[in-house]
Amino acid sequence: MLNEMKYVYAVYQEKSFSKAAKKLYITQPALSAMVKKAEKKIGCPIFDRTTVPLRVTEYGAYYIENIEKILLAESNVQDYYQDLSTLGKGHLSLGGSSYFCSYVLSSLIGEFQKEHPGITIDLLEGNLADLKYGLHTQALDLIIETALTEKDESLTRYIMGHENIILAVPSCFKENARVKDYALTFQDIKSERFVSPDVPAVPLHELHDIPFLMMKPGNDMYKRGMSICRNAGFTPQIHMSLDQILTSFFISRNGAGAVFMRAALFRFLPETDNMVYYKLDDPLAVRPVYLASKKGRYMSRSAQAFLDLCGAEELPEESCAEYE
């Protein structure tokens, strides 16, 4: 029966009998017969064969939900005993955005492998949807992200730390004169001097009429940036929408518009006199950095060791949505 369920689940994952058959290295008629056998046992159709791509029925959704529980339990048993039999060895799959893969995970992996040389590591770079899918399919053990602020029943979240967001404005903008007493230098940000309570935050409403470069809608920095501006009493004039924060910064320093930046990036950026920087006093200008795993999945010793290295602590199961 477990083998039967795996065939059904493959069709569900691929949303196609033909694609699932290729994945399983069996013929499509054989796969179709296996699914029909499962449907006959429960007395209900699992798939709606009239739709493209293939969809599960209401009865099929319940069947798939329980298949996932069974497959997770099977995987947990295998992982547990493999963990026992491979002392000093193991495998760890990590995922993150381009920023985290390039600037955060790269150094953490180096430190981790010095302590655990027998553990091999895979690293996947992707967007949030890709990363969540990797956890769901168990292709990934852990992901690192800032955009996990809303409750998700499928994930267990761990708080790793926090990062600060500042505003970078081209120095050629005449509006900087209004807030010159709040202007900060590149070194003020890089050295983290700006986090001192003695450093005042800019009255952001004074910059309401400058153009902004924003991340595209759906990005956590976009949501935060929009909320920070609205909390200051205005809706920003968006000059451009971009996918990558580094691209935004390099366009911004050529005079295109202001940009919200993660302060930690300044350790890796080339210094420039073309920009002025400002501290923000909105609570949304400090955001959590999370690690996350699939809820209910067995936590291998290698994954736990990585969480320990990061000093990550599990969050209680409650929503921590921070903006509208």
Image (cartoon, grey):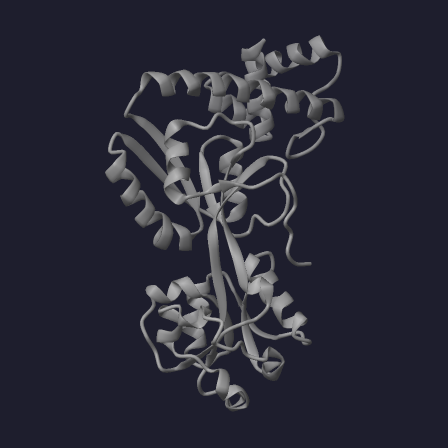
Q: Nearer the viewer, residue 71 or 224?
A: 224
Residue occupying image coordinates x 46% and y 68% = 195
Q: Give the quadrant of residue 269.
A: bottom left
Residue 166 position, x and y percent, is 49, 70
In this view, 79 is above or below 177 = above
| Residue nearer the viewer, 311 or 145 | 311
Tell me the quadrant of the picture where the N terminus can be found.
top right
The residue positioned 49% from the left and 49% from the top of the image is: 145
Query: In the orientation shown, which residue stands out farthest toward the front?
Result: 198
- The residue under the point 28% across, 44% down is 111
Please give left or right for residue 257 compared with residue 56 in the image. Answer: left
- Decide: is 238 above or below 56: below
Q: Is residue 77 above or below residue 200?
A: above
* Residue 162 visible at all: yes
Tell me residue 286's x, y (percent): 53, 61
Instruction: Locate residue 225, reporting x and y percent.
Output: 58, 66
Left or right placement of residue 234 versus residue 97 in this view: right
Q: Is residue 48 at all visible to an observer of this figure?
A: no
In the image, residue 55 lies at what x, y percent?
68, 30
> Which image quadrant is residue 47 in?
top right
Horizontal placement of 168 versus 114: left or right? right
Number of marks in picture: 0
Quadrant of the snapshot with the C terminus: bottom right
Q: Is residue 26 left or right of residue 210?
A: left
